[in-house]
Image (cartoon, rainbow, N blue to C red):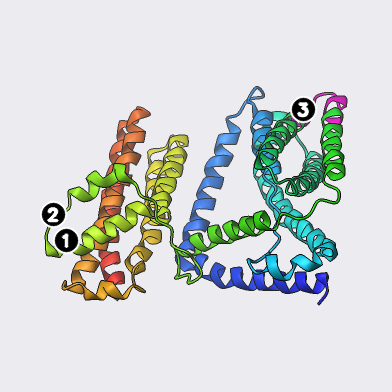
Amino acid sequence: MTANDLWRERFRGFTKETGKYLKYIFNGHFAFVLIFAVGGLSYYYSQWVKTLSSDFPAGLIMAAVFGLMLTISPVFTFLKEADIVFLLPMETRLNPYMAKSRTISFVFQGYLLLMVLAAFMPMHAKVNAASFGDFIIGLILLLVLKYVNIQIRWQTLYYPDNRVLLVDSVIRLCLNIAFLYLYFDKAPIVYPVVIACALLFLLMYFKRDTSGKPLKWERLISMESKRMSAFYRIANLFTDVPKLKERAVRRKWLDWIVSAIPYKQESSYSYLYSRTFLRSNDYLGLSVRLTVIGIIISLIFASVWAKAITVLLFLYLTGIQLLPLAKHHNLKIWIDLYPVSKAYRERAVSGILRWVLIVESLLFALAALVQGNVMGAGISLAAGILFMLLFSGYAKRKLAG
């Protein structure tokens, strides 16, 4: 098997593995919510753009967002743990494999840049009078910068010291943001050219300094494993993922929550699933992230009805993605040894869902209240409580089935 054949086999395996779970992620429920959310946000975004004036810092915002996207330039190598043994002898013949990995990384990340640039263009056109030609030129510049950043990132992976990667990321972030800000702000072309030369110099320096250095197999395999684990954690919110390694984090500062659970036999499942929710990043972390994002989006909208729709949307996302909590311990035989009725298990999960949705609703209402929107806070809270009651009934039927 040649390096090219190996890469094609790994890439086919990657697409097959991810495709298997993507069909569960983009199921009917989530697809409907996603379409609804994109449509609603697009409408309010277009209305917000109409209110912008020429002194709005659109160039700075775009430079910061794209600068971060350019700096974060991972290389998808599709390496596996056994490769450190079986591929190590043919390391010198893997250049075509690694070149294809950098190319596919560029394609994936370039497509993401295209989507984000298209989303920013209405704001850019309103503030800076940008045209379709500016969109094409901006896209070309972003793709060239992304290619250079991926190449630099790849060269730094040859260094054994992780501090080199950190320093490189900071330098590239500053250069990327400076270049894009000068371009979007329509500064004299000489300034962006100077920064572009600095990036090219950085690439040539790293290429020369890492020439002849061996691959850092442990780092590359670890990075690939973390990327796939992140994908599996997302997929696990929609379906069971056997390959996902469970990870628990001891959060002693949250012990006061489980200490409130009565000490009796019927509370066994309540204690177990409460601990599971608090110690697993898949559930607690997800709830926190969705709540924070929902609060930020709701604060952007001035309309009380837009706030209420945002609350319902994020409560729905939270509830749907916490339902797999009921199956978290299904593969553990010792759970079946509990001398407690299975009905208490369903009751425990339903109770946790109710409390999470109630707390999330209160936080949404509090955010609107801090903003000075009393009516918005009241409507958000009422919408949240109504949704919690309706979703609790749905969750009971789902868990019982």
The amino acid on which the numbered mark 1 sits, given as a three-letter code, is Ser
Badge 2 marks a residue whose secondary structure is loop
- Up the image or down, 86 lies above or below 378; here it is below
Query: Residue 319 location in percent, x, y?
Result: 36, 57
Labels 3 and 2: the sequence-earlier one: 3
- Up the image or down, 327 lies above or below 314; here it is below
The answer to whether residue 297 of the structure is visible from this angle is: yes
Q: Nearer the viewer, residue 188 or 285?
A: 285
Query: Residue 311 location in percent, x, y?
Result: 38, 46
Query: Which quarter of the picture shows residue 189?
Result: top right
Q: Nearer the viewer, residue 197 or 185?
A: 197
Total of numbered circles in the picture?
Answer: 3
The amino acid on which the numbered mark 3 sits, given as a three-letter code, is Leu
Q: Which residues are magenta?
A: 181-193
| Nearer mark to the viewer, of 3 and 1 | 1
Number of the label disc, if any, that sits on residue 267: 1
Residue at 47% across, 35% down: 300
- Judged by its main secondary structure, the magenta piece is helix
**Residue corresponding to mark 3:** 182
Badge 1 marks a residue whose secondary structure is helix
Labels 3 and 1: the sequence-earlier one: 3
**Residue corresponding to mark 2:** 262
The crowding category of the residue bearing disc 1, from other C-alpha atoms within 10 Å (few below 14, some 14 to 19, many at least 20), is some
Query: Which quarter of the picture shows residue 280?
Result: bottom left
Labels 1 and 2: the sequence-earlier one: 2
Badge 3 marks a residue whose secondary structure is helix
The crowding category of the residue bearing disc 2, from other C-alpha atoms within 10 Å (few below 14, some 14 to 19, many at least 20), is few
Query: Residue 388 location in percent, x, y?
Result: 28, 54
